[in-house]
């Protein structure tokens, strides 16, 4: 007869039996080295965790049913929903921000933009997790924390445990198409008596995390090699502390009883002792009697977790010893007749562990003696629930923390928590990470992230339907109010201004990304003196965003904003020795030309970073030759709803940008069909954002045309490049022909050396359509010459005119007469007045 050898170990994507697990354990160091060779992208993990979390919260999902089958006997299935909440993208991104400072902590960035020093949180390597046998959620959550830090993880579960951890982590790994998660997860199920296996899993570890009491820690500590970090997640003791007034408050007693009964004191944050701010023993006994009555009136446990024989013995022994000491005047016992709860009043202040199951000590402890009494037990202290006046809470909180407590809460909230809360006084992710630094020389001045020179961030391919602006506006109406913290309206250059909503976390992530892009474009926060001349007001985000970007870079800023008084603006530029301008091309062009004499005489402006529009090549030439501008680059390419999408580097020219690949995925699709194009072909730019807590903007057709730029970039960045080739709205259907505004600009510039702005106005007089090209009087080209060049160089336009389907006119106007959007000041390239 063959004896089955169950496959109750999960090893890097496969379930294996004891024999195979033993063989693989011997080669654990090599397996770890191979796994660490390929980084785990944080976004890959977040996407998989979020998908698993959604499945765990859906009782009808097949994954939920599969995992429910592995729950311990008697365990409520609601524990899966609790796990699902932790696995959500919202919770994990908040945890990453709180503990490691951002959602991409492993990327080598510049914490101080003025220095070429790069820092990051990187994995320690291998984390060995020794899970307890009495907490079903601890094992998988501990591994996910190790994964968030990028580590390889080997987990030991008890031989008495079910296979929930193995199967849950296997489901997580199955949701990762890259296989990187599976490479970082090993789950072994064996008894602690199997010391050879325990030694093999701890020997190559960089961190050993132990969940349990002192005995568990001691049993593992012997296997921890020198230099390995031992992280103890041991049992802790918590207490409540009541001032005299609070001890008389019935609502405080009700709240305290709730803390005692919630989870039947099985949580480390459950109160085991109630301290009173008094030296009067009679007060202690009187309070204990009142509180015992409140505790006895609490509802029976929802889940009947009956104490085991050992726990029953401890309850009985503790109560009997307290009753014996009543004869010495030291204690009094107030127990419910049915044994459901007991309050043990003790005149001695020393911290004493409770036998749990609704058993509470009540002791006197004047606040002046709090530190001396509790500090000897500081290794075991966790939560202090404090009740009193506001001044009392402030004073007692500081005193309790000095005594060794790691968290203070109101009474009634001792078992509560908040997202990102440290555990036992530390952040777990920092314990599982190393803070590293790379110091570089001046060659790296424009390199904001060192990783960009080595590799490109890789995300799961986008899926699902395409979204247009109307669909995104509908998604905005569905945003959770917790994520709708910042409201922006678009400039409205292509239609009605649209609303965009952001959480502050998302906004911060995007401003840091845009700041990195500005460094790549040649902005120098150490020396540049910048005038922020973007438009402000009307909920438009231009000025505010670039104020935030400069703030994060630590750059010198004159927040002037775009204003109609060009003389006053120019005078301030001179007075404050500004050498760098931020703004819209159309505004900067007007400012420089209207105040040309003053600004040329000043001669101090060296750099222009522009956004929202583009300078033509002739305009760039004029700015360089006439005003001595040395650097003219895009400040960013982005949109109000998606944020920064691309950035220019010192090796970029024209409309070529690098993708913010740590934020977005870019597809370039056929103009009329949902299919990708070959590199170099012009198509619709479709973005999927990867760093938004509040919204999932997947496959958003932003309305711009472009093409992929292949080959290495001179700046060395591996981030993909693309060239902007106008907007879909710049293509107009006129007299049966499709005409492109960019062609009008290119012909006027190349054939007539025109260097100003150009606007197309479409109208209809009832008999035929009329196309009027507006050029600037100061643009250096006569209207007749521009008209002739357009007819000669644009075949479709010439045909429409010759077929008498269209009247063509070119008129020269003052730049102030161009139609612009009221909010952003952008030039409206095409003004359609047809009815």
Image: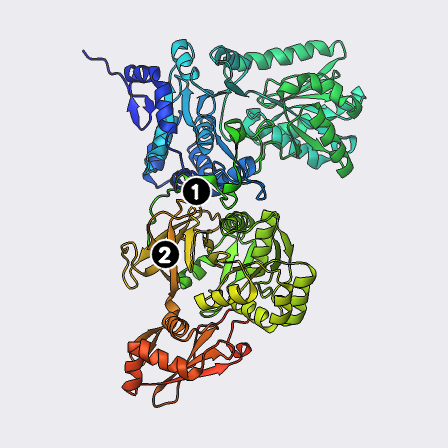
Q: Which of 467 and 551 is in front in this view?
A: 551
- For the point 74% across and 34% down, the residue is 393
- For the point 58% across and 48% down, the residue is 553
Seen in the image, is 573 located left or right of residue 24? right
Tag 2 secondary structure: strand
Q: Can residue 822 be seen in this view?
A: yes
Name which of mark 1 and mark 2 comes first in the sequence: 1
Quarter location, residue 541: bottom right
* Residue 190 x/y as whole percent: 38, 15
Looking at the rendered image, the quarter that the N terminus falls into is top left
Looking at the rendered image, the quarter that the C terminus falls into is bottom left
Q: Which of 616 and 260 is in front in this view?
A: 616
Q: Name the residue under label 1.
A: 452
Up-down: is 427 above or below 321? Answer: below
Q: Mark 2 points at which residue?
A: 686
Tag 1 secondary structure: helix
């Amino acid at each position: 007869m063959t004896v089955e050898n169950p496959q109750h170990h999960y090893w890097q994507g496969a379930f294996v039996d004891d024999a195979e697990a033993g063989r693989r354990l011997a080669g654990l160091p090599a397996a770890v080295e191979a796994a660490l060779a390929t980084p785990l992208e944080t976004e890959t993990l977040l996407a998989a965790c979020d998908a698993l979390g959604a499945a765990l919260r859906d009782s009808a999902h097949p994954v939920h049913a599969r995992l429910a089958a592995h729950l311990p006997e008697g365990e409520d299935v609601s524990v899966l929903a609790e796990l699902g909440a932790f696995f959500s993208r919202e919770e994990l991104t908040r945890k990453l921000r709180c503990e490691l400072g951002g959602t991409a902590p492993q990327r080598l960035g510049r914490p101080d933009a003025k220095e070429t020093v790069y820092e990051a949180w990187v994995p320690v390597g291998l984390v060995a997790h020794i899970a307890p046998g009495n907490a079903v959620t601890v094992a998988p959550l501990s591994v996910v924390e190790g994964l968030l830090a990028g580590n390889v993880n080997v987990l030991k579960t008890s031989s008495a445990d079910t296979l929930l951890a193995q199967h849950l982590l296997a489901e997580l790994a199955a949701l990762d198409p890259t296989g990187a998660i599976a490479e970082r997860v090993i789950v072994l199920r064996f008894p602690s008596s199997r010391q050879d296996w325990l030694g093999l899993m701890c020997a190559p570890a960089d961190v050993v995390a132990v969940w349990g009491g002192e005995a568990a820690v001691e049993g593992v500590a012997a296997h921890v090699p020198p230099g390995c970090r031992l992280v103890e997640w041991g049992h802790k003791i918590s207490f409540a502390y009541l001032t005299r007034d609070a001890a008389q408050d019935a609502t405080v007693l009700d709240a305290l009883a709730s803390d005692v009964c919630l989870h039947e004191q099985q949580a480390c944050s459950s109160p085991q002792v109630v301290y009173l701010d008094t030296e009067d023993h009679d007060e202690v006994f009187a309070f204990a009697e009142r509180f015992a009555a409140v505790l006895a009136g609490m509802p029976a446990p929802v889940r009947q977790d009956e104490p085991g024989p050992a726990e029953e013995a401890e309850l009985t022994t503790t109560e009997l010893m307290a009753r014996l000491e009543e004869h010495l005047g030291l204690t009094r016992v107030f127990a419910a007749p049915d044994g459901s709860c007991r309050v043990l009043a003790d005149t001695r202040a020393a911290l004493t562990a409770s036998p749990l199951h609704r058993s509470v000590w009540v002791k006197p402890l004047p606040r002046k003696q709090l530190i001396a009494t509790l500090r000897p037990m500081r290794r075991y202290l966790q939560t202090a629930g404090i009740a009193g006046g506001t001044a009392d809470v402030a004073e007692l909180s500081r005193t309790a923390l000095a005594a060794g407590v790691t968290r203070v809460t109101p009474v009634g909230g001792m078992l509560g928590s908040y997202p990102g809360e440290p555990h036992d006084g530390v952040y777990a992710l920092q314990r599982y990470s190393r803070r590293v630094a790379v110091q570089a020389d001046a060659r790296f001045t424009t390199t904001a992230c060192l990783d960009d020179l080595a590799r490109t961030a890789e995300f799961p391919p986008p899926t699902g339907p395409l979204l247009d602006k109307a669909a995104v506006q509908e998604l905005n109406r569905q945003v959770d109010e917790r994520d709708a913290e910042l409201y922006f309206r678009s400039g409205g250059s292509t239609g009605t201004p649209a609303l965009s909503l952001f959480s502050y976390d998302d906004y911060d992530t995007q401003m840091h990304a845009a700041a990195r892009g500005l460094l790549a474009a040649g902005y120098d926060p150490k020396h540049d003196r910048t005038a922020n001349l973007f438009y402000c007001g009307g909920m438009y985000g231009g000025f505010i965003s670039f104020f935030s970007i400069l703030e994060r870079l630590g750059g010198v800023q004159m927040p002037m904003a775009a204003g109609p008084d060009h003389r006053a603006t120019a005078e301030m530029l001179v007075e404050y020795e500004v050498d760098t301008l931020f703004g819209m091309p159309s505004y900067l062009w007007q400012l420089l030309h209207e105040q040309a004499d003053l600004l040329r005489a000043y001669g101090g402006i060296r750099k222009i970073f522009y956004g929202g529009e583009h300078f033509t090549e002739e305009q760039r030439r004029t700015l360089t030759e006439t005003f001595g501008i040395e650097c003219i680059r895009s400040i960013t390419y982005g949109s109000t709803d998606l944020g920064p999408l691309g950035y220019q580097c010192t090796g970029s020219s024209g409309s070529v940008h690098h993708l913010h690949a740590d934020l977005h995925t870019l597809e370039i699709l056929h103009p009329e069909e949902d299919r990708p194009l070959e590199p170099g072909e012009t198509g619709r730019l479709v973005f999927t954002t990867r760093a938004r807590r509040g919204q999932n903007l997947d496959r958003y057709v932003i309305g711009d045309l472009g093409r992929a730029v292949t080959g290495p970039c001179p700046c060395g960045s591996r981030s993909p490049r693309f060239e902007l080739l106008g907007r879909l709205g710049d293509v107009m259907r006129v007299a049966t022909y499709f005409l492109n505004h960019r062609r009008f600009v290119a012909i006027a510039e190349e054939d007539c050396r025109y260097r100003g702005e150009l606007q197309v106005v479409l109208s209809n007089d009832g008999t035929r359509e009329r196309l009027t090209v507006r050029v600037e009087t100061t643009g250096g080209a006569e209207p007749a010459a521009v008209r002739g060049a357009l007819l000669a160089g644009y075949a479709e336009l010439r045909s429409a005119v010759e077929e008498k389907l269209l009247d063509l006119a070119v008129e020269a106007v003052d730049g102030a007469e161009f139609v612009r959007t009221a909010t952003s000041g952008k030039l409206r390239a095409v003004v359609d007045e047809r009815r």
